[in-house]
């Protein structure tokens, strides 16, 4: 069994980390927005669930131009979410319950409300204050054209002009100006930030847009041309490490510097990179002298297909092993369609078009989606490495695809001229009870409306209910902790087509039937099944079992 004690420096290697999106988790003060006191009051849910750590998405001062990832102060708490004292109380309670605390760190950009950016606007062109960001003069006779053709991840140009004629870079929303990581002040300030939270007892960091910090700012700035603005496809079309602003080789020097800070603590602080890069490049971020671990999104992006998943699993394990790290497994997070809905959409479905249809074209079979999601979860939890669980997936929550346009908050909606609906559907606040204006989320209505169907998914309904998704997670995590040993698996060579079958140890085997027909169940004691087994010796479709 893995040692997840407080002094074990390797606690993260096979941990289960629960992502809390604070504004949608629990609202203690009744203003409709989740807050830190709400998190603290509900930490017993995480302890009972059986996770090892909570990862807290941004709770910093923010105008919410991008759901909190537009940070106005990296070393404070948004007043609407609480205070630093509230954070300390939450961290203390988490540690009392045996939970590690991981926080988001957002180093690629700040909010346009950050004191530095306000100073830069006041100071004017050529000032030292502007050197902390990426300001340039425009092209064209009067500088009226953007400096380059670089595009924002959220749509449109990545440059915005200010009244004095300069343009600033924002690879995301205009309210998120990019920092200049060639600037010593920027580097020193983030060292201070890492120590600030580590000194407050934070156990680790999730690094947002880890592949975006280093940029080629030599003059003249390079256009990207037909490379594309975002995604791994653009990176595959250039020599590795040479894209103008994604995944440049220079970024690794930054993380080697951070690792010195992490290792100054006992146990060392952990980190995981959000780096949307090809496999071989992702391994670089996960090296022991850098962040130590990197998110692997291939599992999340894979279809419900045994051959594809086996290739992804095998490749991910090899990539992590090459880096000296452990693999990471993710099914849902705050940026993607919840997997209860996603996994049952027909292959090739345009998820944005589906969202724009309000989730009606096609209308997914929610029962079939939940069945498949439960099977995918047991498969994920049997894999060697760390599993990241997104809040609400333990309840089987589906995507809320039919949010009306007038309630949408994701900047993607407006920035793309209503061409992309955005990520609000996976951020709808959690249901804790079957009644009340926000189903126990708070005393009043929630900041995003919850559908009436959420009452049937509430914690109150599922806790202690045999066969519920919540109880499946609780049982799986409790059993996983007992069975955990080693970081390898062995594929069964004669598994039927469409079936994933592997052994973790001599006493723990996972078999997942991804086909539409029942298959014979291998011999062994059934320790846990994602759905009830109707007859002895048979594994139904879309079902995963653990055998002993």
Image: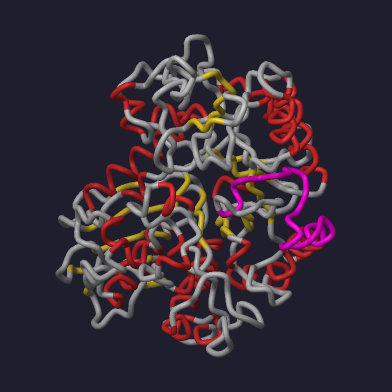
Q: Whole-percent x and y of residue 97?
A: 73, 66
Q: Residue at x 59, y 47 (%)?
A: 69
- What segment is highlighted magenta in the picture? 67-88
In this view, 279 is above or below 155: above
Q: Nearer the viewer, residue 336 or 461?
A: 336
- Image height check: is 34 above or below 294? below
Q: Position of residue 326 (x, y in %)?
A: 51, 41
**Nearer to us in this view, 53 or 209:** 209
Whole-percent x, y for residue 222 in the image: 42, 15
The colouring scheme, among rainbow, by chain, secondary structure or one colour, is: secondary structure
Kindly report the secondary structure that dominates the magenta region of the rendered protein: loop
Q: Nearer the viewer, residue 312 or 331?
A: 331
The quadrant of the image that shows the N terminus is bottom right
**Residue at image location 30% in from the left, 70% down from the top:** 369
Residue 350 visible to an observer of this rendering? yes
* Furthest residue in direction right, as rendered: 85
Res 236 quadrant in image = top left
Q: Quadrant of the C terminus?
A: bottom left
**Can residue 505 be seen?**
no
Residue 80 highlighted magenta (yes or no): yes
Residue 209: where, in percent of width, then height? 53, 37
Q: Residue at x 53, y 34 (%)?
A: 170
Q: Is residue 481 above or below residue 108?
A: below
């Amino acid at each position: 069994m893995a040692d997840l004690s407080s002094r074990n420096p390797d606690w993260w290697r096979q941990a289960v980390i629960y992502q809390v999106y604070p504004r949608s988790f629990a609202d203690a003060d009744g203003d409709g927005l989740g807050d830190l006191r709400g998190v603290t009051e509900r930490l017993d849910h995480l302890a009972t669930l059986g996770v090892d750590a909570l990862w807290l998405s941004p709770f910093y001062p923010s105008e919410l131009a991008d759901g909190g990832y537009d940070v106005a102060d990296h070393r404070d708490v948004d007043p609407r979410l609480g205070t630093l004292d509230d954070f300390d109380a939450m961290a203390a309670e988490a540690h009392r319950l045996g939970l590690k605390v991981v926080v988001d760190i957002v180093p690629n950009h700040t909010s346009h409300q950050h004191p530095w950016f306000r100073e830069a606007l006041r100071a004017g062109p050529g000032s030292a204050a502007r050197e902390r960001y990426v300001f340039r003069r425009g092209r064209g006779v009067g500088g009226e054209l953007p400096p380059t053709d670089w595009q924002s991840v959220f749509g449109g140009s990545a440059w915005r002009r200010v009244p004095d004629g300069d343009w600033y870079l924002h690879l995301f929303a205009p309210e998120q100006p990019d920092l200049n990581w060639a600037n010593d002040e920027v580097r020193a300030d983030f060292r201070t930030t890492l120590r600030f939270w580590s000194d407050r007892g934070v156990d680790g960091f999730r690094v947002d847009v880890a592949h975006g910090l280093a940029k080629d700012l030599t003059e003249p700035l390079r256009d990207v041309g037909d490379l594309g603005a975002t995604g791994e496809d653009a990176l595959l079309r250039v020599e590795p490490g040479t894209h103008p602003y994604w995944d440049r080789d220079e970024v690794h020097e930054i993380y080697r510097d951070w690792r010195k800070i992490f290792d100054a603590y006992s146990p060392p602080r952990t980190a995981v990179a959000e780096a949307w890069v090809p496999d071989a490049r992702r391994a670089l971020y996960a090296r022991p002298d850098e962040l130590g671990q990197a998110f692997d999104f291939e599992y999340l992006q894979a279809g419900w297909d045994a051959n594809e998943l086996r290739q992804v699993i095998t490749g991910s394990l090899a990539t992590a092993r090459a880096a000296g790290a452990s693999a990471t497994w993710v099914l849902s997070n705050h940026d993607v369609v919840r997997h209860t809905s996603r996994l049952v959409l027909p292959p090739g479905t345009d998820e944005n078009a589906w969202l724009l249809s309000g989730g009606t074209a096609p209308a997914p079979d929610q029962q079939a989606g939940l069945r498949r999601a439960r099977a995918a979860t047991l498969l994920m939890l049997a894999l060697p490495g760390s599993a990241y669980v997104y809040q609400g997936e333990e309840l089987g929550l589906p995507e809320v695809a039919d949010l009306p346009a007038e309630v949408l908050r994701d900047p993607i909606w407006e920035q793309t001229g209503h061409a992309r609906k955005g990520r609000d559907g996976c951020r709808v606040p959690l249901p804790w009870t079957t009644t009340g204006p926000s189903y126990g989320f708070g005393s009043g209505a929630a900041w995003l409306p919850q559908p009436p169907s959420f009452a049937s998914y509430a914690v109150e309904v599922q806790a202690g209910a045999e066969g519920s998704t919540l109880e499946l997670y609780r049982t799986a995590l409790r059993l996983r902790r007992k069975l955990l040993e080693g970081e390898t698996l062995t594929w069964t060579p004669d598994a039927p087509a469409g079936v994933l079958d592997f052994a973790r140890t001599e006493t723990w085997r996972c078999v997942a039937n991804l086909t539409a027909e029942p298959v014979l169940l291998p011999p062994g004691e059934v320790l846990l099944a994602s759905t009830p087994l109707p007859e002895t010796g048979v594994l139904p479709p879309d079902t995963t079992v653990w055998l002993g």
